[in-house]
Image (cartoon, rainbow, N blue to C red):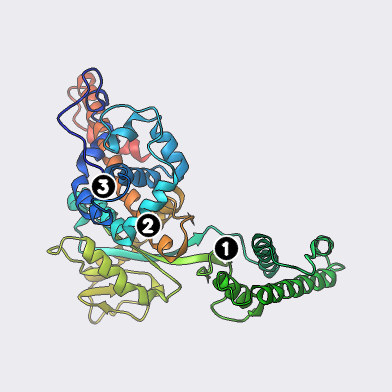
Amino acid sequence: MIKKSPSKQQTSMFFSLEDTLNQKHPLYILANKINWQQFEDNFKEHYCSTKGRPALPIRLMTGLLILKHLRNISDESVVEQWSENIYFQYFCGGKEFKAKEPCEASELVHFRKRIGEAGIELILKESIRINGDDRFDPDVSIDTTVQEKNITFPTDNKLHRKIIEKCLAIVEKEGLPLRQSYKRTLKKLELDQRFRNHPKNKKKAKKADNKIKTIAGRILRELERNLGNNKKYREEIEIFEKILAQKKEDKHKIYSIHEPEVECISKGKEHKKYEFGNKVSIIITQKTGVILGAMSFRNEYDGHTLEPALGQAERLLEEQKSIKMAIADRGYRGTTKVNEVEIRTPKPFNEKTMRKYQQKKMKKKFQRRAAIEPVIGHLKRDHRLGRNFYKGIIGDSINVMLAAMAFNFKRMMRQWKNSFLFHFFKSIFQKLFPDNLNFDILYNTVLHF
C-alpha cells in the first residue's frame, strides 16, 4: 500500500536540512534538479492503494538506488551511510536528520523487482535530461563490452563438486535415504588433485576428476529415484544433468549452477582470454560524452545489437532531436544503416567520391570514437559495471542501466563543482592581479595538469 505523503508545509522549528546544508554542494543541487514527481506518478501503479502495510516512500527508495551506484557501494552500505550522512538524507527527501537506518537492505532488492526494467529505464531517462543541451548531438559513438557476472572461474571439477554439495543438501532437507555420502572418498580425491600441472601428477589428477564426476552422477541418480514424483527440485536437477552431460566443444554450456544464463565471451584480450557474463552495448554523444543508451544482450554479434541499442537511445531522447550518425569500430562491419541512422566504421577512403576535407572530418570522428573506452572503464571501476551482483537476465539489464545513470549524474555533479571552483579562484585572481585577464586559460591549464 502507498504511504500517505507527509505535509510539506510543516517544518521543524529548530533544525531543517534545507536551511543547514551547503546549497552549492553538488548532491544538494542534484536533489533539486531531479524531477521526483514523475517517479511518484509512474511507480505508484506497482503498489496497492488500499490493502497491506504502508510502503516506504518512493523517493526514498529511488534515491537510495541512485546513491548506491553513484558512490559504488552495496545495498547494506548505502542504508548504513544514509543514517550518517545528512546530504544522503536530504537527497532522499528528508526534512530533518534521522539517526536510524531508513529500511532493511533487502527492501532495495524488492524495490528493484517491483519497478522492473521499465522503471530503471525511466531513471536513466531522467539522468539524460539532467545534462541539458549536452545530450543533443546528431553524432554518437557506440561500442560493446562484457559485464562480468559474480561467479568464480568455472571448471568441470568445481561444477561437479557443487552438484554433490547441492544433492547432499536436498537429501538432508527432505530426509531422504542415501547409501553413501562419499565424504571421506572426496577428501582423498582432493589430495590427488593437488599440483596437477606437475608432469608426475597429471595422470593422477585427471583420474581423480573422472572419479568425482562419477560420484556426482551416482548421487544425482539416487536422489532422482528417491524423490519419485516430487517435482519441487525439477529445475535444479535438469541443470545438474546438463552439466554432467556437456562436453568441451558443446555450445550453450552451463558455467554456473546459480547463474545458468552466463555466457562465455572472448573479446580478444591478451590479459583475459575469456570473460563470463553478458554483452553490453554503450552509446555516448561524440562531443559531450553523455551516455544516451545502455542495453544488455547475451552474446550476439556486435552488428546485431545496433537496432535495439539505437532504438533505446532514440526512445530516451526527445523526439525532435534524433541521432543521424553512429561511429563504431570494425567489429560492426557489415551494417551501414539502421532505420535512419548511418553507421560508419573505419576503412580506406574512396578518394573519387570523398574530398580531402570530408576525409579529414571523418578521420577526426573515428579518432574521437576512442573516447568511449575510458567511459566504459569508469562505468566498470566507479559505478559497479565491472562485476554484476544482480540475479538473472533482468539483473544484467538493470545493472548496466543503473551504471549509465550514475555516470550521467556524476558528470553533471563534476561540472557544478568545477564551475564553483572556477568562480571562486577567478574572484581571488582578479583581486590580486586586476590587470591580467587571462585567468580562463590559466585555470584550464592547471586543471589539465
Mark 2 sits on what residue? Answer: 113
State the mark number for residue 222: none
Q: Dot 2 lies on which element?
A: helix
User: Foreground mark, 3 or 1?
Assistant: 3
The number of numbered discs placed on residues in the rendered structure image is: 3
Q: Amino acid at mark 1?
A: Lys
Residue drawn at x 31%, y 64% as measured from the top left: 141
Report crowding for label 2: few under 14, some 14 to 19, many 20 or more residues within 10 A (C-alpha): some
Which secondary structure lies at badge 1?
loop
Q: Give SS at disc 3.
A: loop
Residue 447 left/right relative to 287: right
Q: Name above or below for residue 250 compared with residue 24.
A: below
Please state which of residues 155 and 53 is positioned toward the viewer in this rendering: 53
Residue 235 vs residue 196: left or right? left
Q: Percent from the top left, x then y, of residue 378?
A: 41, 51
Inspect this view and state whether residue 371 appears: no
Q: Nearer the viewer, mark 2 or mark 3?
A: 3
State yes or no: discs 3 and 1 in contact (Cβ < 8 Å): no
Question: How many angstroms separate mark 2 from mark 3 (CA)?
Answer: 16 Å
Q: Which residue is mark 1?
A: 272
Q: Is there CB contact under 8 Å for labels 2 and 1?
A: no
Q: CA distance from mark 3 to mark 1?
A: 48 Å
Q: Nearer the viewer, mark 2 or mark 1?
A: 2
The CA distance from mark 2 to mark 1 is 33 Å
The x and y percentages for residue 351 are 27, 79
Q: Which residue is mark 3?
A: 2
